[in-house]
Image (cartoon, rainbow, N blue to C red):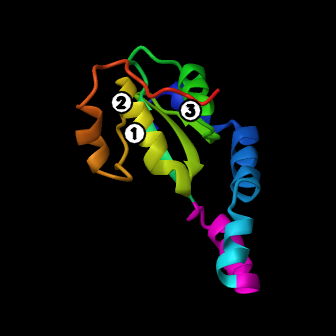
């Protein structure tokens, strides 16, 4: 922790608990059962404990977007966000691993700087095809 803001943010126990519970809540239980039956459910259960069924995305904090605006953007496309937090320079949050590529693409296409390791490095190229601020149409 580099400053007092990060220290205070680290004390937010509610977000840690919500993040842990949400990892189980948004797990792919149906898909796990459909692919491997009970063994799939067991694998998914342990993936939840290790946070292996979700992806953490970090975005630049001072790029003209608030965390609420980013979450609303992703929600418009059916992407749930949990495990939210921030550091001095970044917002971070988790999404379902099966939606990580899409979430990352939406952020980058919109011009929101993703600072974490990319789930799919091709998204950087895809995002360059569009003007900053562009976003695909929604079905709503």
**Magenta part, dominant SS:** helix
Residue 8 in sight here: no
Query: Disc 1 versus disc 3: distance between alpha carbons?
Result: 10 Å
Q: Secondary structure at mark 3?
A: helix
Report crowding for label 2: few under 14, some 14 to 19, many 20 or more residues within 10 A (C-alpha): many
Secondary structure, mark 2, is helix
**20, above or below 61, in the image:** below
Depth check: 12 or 59 in front? 59
Looking at the picture, how far across and down is residue 6, in whole percent? Answer: 52, 31
Residue 112 relative to residue 99: left or right: left
Q: CA distance from mark 2 to mark 3?
A: 12 Å
Q: Residue at x 42, y 41 (%)?
A: 104
Residue under label 3: 74
Which residue is found at the position 69% from the left and 36% from the top? 12
| Residue placed under numbered mark 2 in the picture | 109
Q: Looking at this rendering, what residue extends furthest in the top direction?
A: 64
* Residue 87 is a magenta residue: no
Measured along the vertical axis of the image, is residue 37 above or below residue 27?
A: below
Instruction: Determine whether label 2 and label 3 are within 8 Å by CB.
Output: no
Q: Earlier in the sequence, mark 2 or mark 3?
A: 3
Image location (x, y in percent) of residue 43? 66, 78
Q: Residue at x 68, y 80 (%)?
A: 40
**Magenta range:** 37-53
Residue identifier under label 1: 105
Front residue (pair 56, 17): 56
Q: Quadrant of residue 88?
A: top left
Q: Are marks 1 and 2 in contact (CB under 8 Å)?
A: yes
């Amino acid at each position: 922790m580099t400053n007092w803001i990060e220290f205070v943010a680290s004390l937010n126990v509610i977000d840690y608990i919500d993040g842990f519970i949400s990892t189980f809540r948004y797990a792919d239980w149906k898909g796990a059962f459909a692919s491997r039956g009970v063994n799939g459910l067991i694998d998914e259960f342990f993936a939840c404990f290790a946070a292996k069924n979700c992806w953490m995305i970090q975005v630049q904090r001072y790029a003209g977007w608030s965390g609420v605006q980013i979450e609303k953007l992703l929600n418009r496309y059916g992407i749930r966000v949990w495990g939210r937090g921030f550091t001095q320079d970044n917002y971070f949050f988790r999404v379902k691993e099966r939606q990580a590529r899409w979430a990352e693409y939406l952020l980058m296409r919109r011009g929101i700087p993703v600072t974490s390791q990319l789930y799919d490095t091709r998204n950087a190229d895809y995002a360059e095809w569009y003007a900053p601020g562009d976003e695909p149409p929604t079905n709503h």
